[in-house]
Image (cartoon, grey):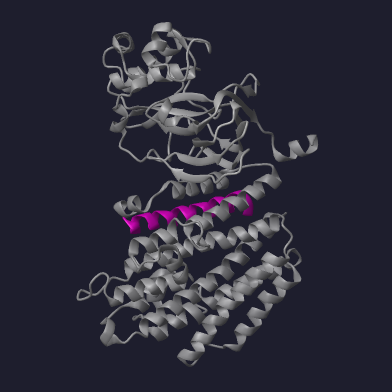
Amino acid sequence: MRIRISHATTYRYDTPPNAVTQLLRLTPRNHDGQYVVEWRIDLSQDCQLHQHEDAFGNITHSFTADGPFDSLAISVSGEVDTQDMSGFVRGAVERFPPALFLRETDLTFPDAAIVEFAEATRAEAGAGASTLSVMHQLMANVNGELAFDVRPTQTVTTAAEAFKLKRGVCQDLTHIFIAAARHLGVPARYIGGHFYRADGVTAQDAGHAWAEAYIDDYGWIGFDPTNGICPIDAHVRIAAGLDFLGASPVRGTRYGGQGETLIVAVNVAQTGQQSQSQSQG
Amino acid sequence: MLSRTADNLYWLSRYVERAEYLARILDATQRLSSLPLAYVGTSNEWESAVLTAGCATAFFKIYDEANEENVTDFLAFSTANSSSIRSCFEMARSNARAVRTALTMEMWDQINGTWLELQRYGNGPTSREELSRFLRWVQESSLRFDGSAYRTMLRNDAYWFSRLGVYIERADNTARILDVKYHLLLPDNERVGGPLDYFQWAAILRSVSALTAYHWVYRDSLKPWLVADLLILKEELPRSLASCYEAIVRNLDSISGAYGRQGPAQRQARAIRTRLQNSRMDGIFQRGLHEFISEFITETNGLGGAITEQFLV
């Protein structure tokens, strides 16, 4: 599937800041299931954009824009060609042994309720069930247990808090999945990316998130608890990390300035073949 | 475009590129063999030239010993060797003649002129000097052909197929040149990093016109892992594997964009490019450079097969 993505992050400041420094994880890499046809990042302020690679192999861009300015827009757009790999992640950048992804983080700490939930899931899958089927059961249970609701949670909500509320966004569901999987001794990581919606709604408020679990004999396999499916050709994988903070699209700091408001607009659409778009042109 | 036309264009470029590559190998080998024996000890560079060219079996069917005379004759002038420089130019010209109307005047003039001039060299030069002149002429002919294609061809499927031939062949050739160092084992009394080792690496870099580029990029003495890094992973170097695959994918994308359809060739090329982009030198050395290159050559052959399957038959 050919997916065209545009992702605009706009900051507006009541009092202009002196400078803004940010680190962007907005650029996808190629692996067997996806190929980046073209990709570009545009900033509304003049500055130097440096490309690096973080410890997990994600492509990062960093910049410092000197103020004062009233607004700062980071727009990313590009086209990615994807294939359905039935959830398997092959040929991706791996910089660490899978065991590293057993490490707990603040956002994915399993409290008593999550531990109990994880144990119950393992029991439900049945004695002697393979790790793979336990993970599928876990994905289904997280998907069934929590209601999708954008209101109550924020970017810093932990897995335990969201689990108590029984509601959250893709980020919270993913954190809970990761916390439970790690408790069961399965290495799991957080994936930030984009999702093309089959219902044709292309304008979205945010990117998408899902998890990957390392299963012996298979390697890394994706699990999308929000949609209750393993990633298909509608998923575009951008960054991997231990939790949201490690894979977050934009992180940064600002010197001076006040009253920051943030607007994020994401558009994920399927592009037709070249000849079609020309005739529509 | 007829598959047959695409096939001719593709192989025309491949043969011209291969002729240049053979000339580069012979040039590098000649350089190595002219080092004073007292300085480097005994070595087997003529045999390794045959191994690099990938025609050792055919060679040893005809000759017993790999020496300067035999190898030069076999790789440059032999009609028995289907990929000698002479055979390459002859096949390039017959491919060009079959698609004369798909070529520009400049390209045809160039390839036909090369073929006519080849006759002048007869059965081979009589001296080392003349051989050097010949090898230089081969490389210049290839450059002129490449340049005339780049400057005069319409950017349509004909151009993309001819480029595809160039880059597939070049990727394969660079991989083989790098592998030569594996075959060209150091004699027991020579140490790694010693004079012979140094000259061998320098010869490899020179044979892909990358010696100056090496010093620009690394500002360091010649180190095997840096040479490998340059020739495998650096997209900036026009003969590196990464750069060849960038071009292969780009041209396949152009073809599929024009035809409105994707296929296995494009997917395979993208997969190999992805692997190159995601690899790092320490990982490659850990698994073994020779293993990596052998695998790469097999995969590139596979891609050549997929391209043939999808477009050329």
Q: Which residues are magenta?
A: B288-313
State the predominant SS element of the stretch in magenta. helix
Q: Locate the N terminus of chain A and report the quarter of the image it occupies.
A: top right
Q: Which of the pair A18/B45 is nearer the observer?
A: A18
For the view shown, which residue lies furthest in the left direction? B189
Give yes or no for residue B2 being in the magenta stretch: no
Where residue A20 appears, as percent x and y from the top left, is: 52, 35
Q: Is residue A30 visible?
A: no
Name the residue: 61% across, 40% down: A45
Q: Residue at x 73, y 66 (%)?
A: B152
Left or right: A268, with B1 as reference point: left
Residue B192: % across, % down: 25, 69
Left or right for B158, reference A84: right
Q: Is residue B240 depicted above or below A201 in this figure?
A: below
Q: How many marks?
A: 0
Q: Is residue B256 above or below residue B92?
A: above
Using the rendered view, name the quadrant where residue A18 is placed: top right
The residue at the point 33 percent across, 28 percent down is A215
**Residue A185 can be seen in this image:** yes
Query: Could you tell me residue A258's position as x and y percent?
Result: 55, 25
Quadrant where the C terminus of chain A sits is top right
Tell me if residue B301 is in the magenta stretch: yes
Q: Is residue A217 above or below residue A199?
A: below
Out of A56 and B88, give the one closest to the viewer.
Answer: A56
Give the quarter of the image for residue A145.
top left
**Front one among B273 and A18:** A18
Task: Measuring from the top left, give residue A229's x and y in whole percent.
Answer: 48, 20
